[in-house]
Amino acid sequence: MTAPHATTQFFHTFDNPWIAIAAATGAMLGFITINALWLIWLERKVSARMQRRYGPTEVGPFGLLQTLADVVKLVGKELITPDHVHRPLYLIAPILAFAPLAALLSLLPIDADWVFHDFDITLVLLLAFSGLNVIAIFAAGWGSNNKYALLGAVRAVAQNISYEIPLLLAVLPIVLMTRSLSLHEIASAQSYPFILVQPLAFIIYFISATAETNRAPFDIPEAESELIAGFHTEYSGMRFGVFFLAEFTNMVIVCAVATLLFLGGWKGPLLPGFVWFFIKVYGLIAVMMVFRWTFPRLRFDQLMTFAWTILVPLALVNLLVTIVVLKL
Amino acid sequence: MMRPKSTMELVPGDDETYYLNMGPQHPSTHGVLRLRLHLEGERILGAEPVIGYGHRAHEKMAENRDYLQFLPNTSRIDYLSGMIYNLGYCQAIEKAMQIEVPERAEYIRVICAELNRLTSHLLWLGTYLLDLGGFTPFLYAFDDREKLLDILDSVTGSRLTYSYGRFGGVSMDVDDTFLRAAADYCTYFRKRIDEYHALVTHNIIFRHRTKGVGVMGPQLALDYGVSGPCLRAAGVARDLRKDEPYGIYDRFAFDIVTAEGGDCFARHMVRMGEMEQSLNIIEQAVGGIPDGPVLAAKVPKRIRPPAGEHYFAVESARGHFGMYLRSDGTDVPVRLKLRTPSFVHVATMPVVLPGTMLADTVAILGSIDIVIPEIDR
């Protein structure tokens, strides 16, 4: 174990551990907010450029403050709770969607000695926590007591469960190669990026991750042309904003894991580690955005067929080949 | 002829089925159409279109004003191919009153109608991809459509509801700039069609979403009176511009585009092919346009079609648009029945939709290219 230095160092700068936790949480939430603001701006700019438009230009330089203005608008909106909803579920769902993701950010090693928590099984914890997202979506859909929302939630659950399997199967070869479940150790072990030896695993991981985050062409739970807005149809104002925030945080997390597992994490020449880390993460996110603005949406049953008949067998074969090669 | 069971007759029992109201306010019903879907999970058991939310009583309005006063209404029946409806109405009256239209006006009518058909098909392409979840093609198609609207705007003064036709010709002559712009657009758009094919037609997700979905076979199509691209996609080569040529369509060389299968993909291919054929027609018309007046000299001051029944039909962007007129010889029609294609097409939904998935509903509804004001009139 190499990483805990960072953690202990960080906590030792404060006398009181509670203050340390509060500082860490504050930093995390700040990062989430700024990250979401900048990602939404990036998304709008990427889509605009792909569609021969300018995107936001008015507020701030290059329209950078446009999202901030939108957030102010969202915060200012009335939070409408429709009469027919199941109140406890309806109210808890946005928090449930957001909280696990915020916790997960603390597990990501951003640089060689820059991580809040690191222990033996961060990867397992991360994958388990990202599974909680499904519960939040289902709570939102069920609690909304709306047919469109329920349909969206049912789709989301089926989709996320299906795609978690190829995702795990794509991660396993890396775990076998490094014999570690700690993100920090896996990243440290890469003298070359693992994508070079595990390209198939990377592709499967990335496709599954796109589906996990409900991004197009897998945005079936919130397919706006069929289901209005899917599971968050009944949410307004900042409650809707929180779902949005969760989506963008989730993107960062899955892309950060891809960076750590396949792209060598913070490693790179010349620039400091964390800069490389963020370059890689945002590069992957940009690819996801290009997906979104390029492809039409798959149909629900086609999506499931794709996961179970193509991705899962491929991932299994890849895993078997890895095991055989490692044993030779 | 199959008669679909009305969803109103189906009583929900203790089976695990439910009803979903799609519309009248829904992003994919292209306006105020309401579909009452009977679902089992995501599978559709029954569907019933409920129409009338955008009803404006055009037919009744026709009975309350003279023929020229009704002219602006015609572009508003189908606001996406308003020019074709507008000119079609003029042609109907001209046929009833036997007014001769000058050559130049006939050519201008063909050019404008085909440009309008292009705008309609382009809008369809964009919104169809939007229905399927692809946002980017929408803006490309609208960009191309915008150029066309500018061309039409330059001569008619409006972008959608043109009211350009007059009994005996058109309201304004076109200049060389207009003709050159139309010809240039044809050259430009031929390249664009290849791009659309590369990006849309050959996209694997698009093919998966449309192939074999929403099959409307030739028998079903003919039984219901389906017309236009939807009928041609079922393999029936029927196009009023060829079969019963009106205006001067018999002078131009163009093909009736057909496809096999009658599914959403076939309808896509037919419309893409039709855009190319429209370009052919426009190029020939621009090349052969003669000089001369654009309005007949001897048009009666008062439009009074002879007493009796008159019928005239044109091929709109969506299909067979027919006008049945009963006149008693006064300057107000006794009855003007408008036969619009979308009304017929949406009537096939109770047969076509059952058995498909919920996501297919938007794919099918989009592929038949419904325009709600045209259904409701």
Image (tube, helix red, strand yellow):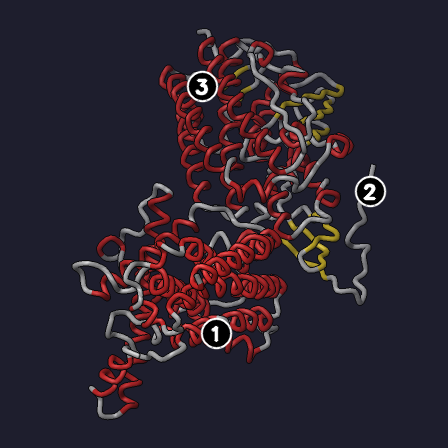
Q: Residues within 10 Å of mark 2 (few under 14, many from 20)?
A: few
**Do the residues under discs 3 and 1 have CB atoms within 8 angstroms?**
no
Question: Which of the two residues, A81 or B266, is positioned nearer the viewer here?
Answer: B266
Residue identified by numbered label 3: B172
Q: Nearer the viewer, residue A114 or B201?
A: A114
**Secondary element type, mark 2:** loop
Which three-letter amino acid code belongs to the residue tagged 3? Answer: Met
Quadrant of residue B334 within the rendered picture: top right
Of the numbered discs 2 and 3, the one sitting upstream in the chain is 2
Residue A155 as seen in the image, left or right of residue B9: left
* Residue at far left of view: A270
Q: Which residue is mark 1?
A: A128
Left or right position of B251 against B329:
left
Depicted B349 relative to depicted B190: above or below: below
> Tag 1: residue type?
Ala
Q: Residues within 10 Å of mark 1 (few under 14, many from 20)?
A: few
**Residue depth check, mark 2 versus mark 3: number of the one nearer the observer:** 2
Image quadrant occupied by the C terminus of chain A: bottom left
**Chain on which label 1 sits:** A
Q: Which residue is mark 2?
A: B3
| Residues at marks 2 and 3, CA–CA distance in whole angstroms | 49 Å
Query: What chain does mark 2 sit on?
Result: B
Q: Number of callouts in the render?
A: 3
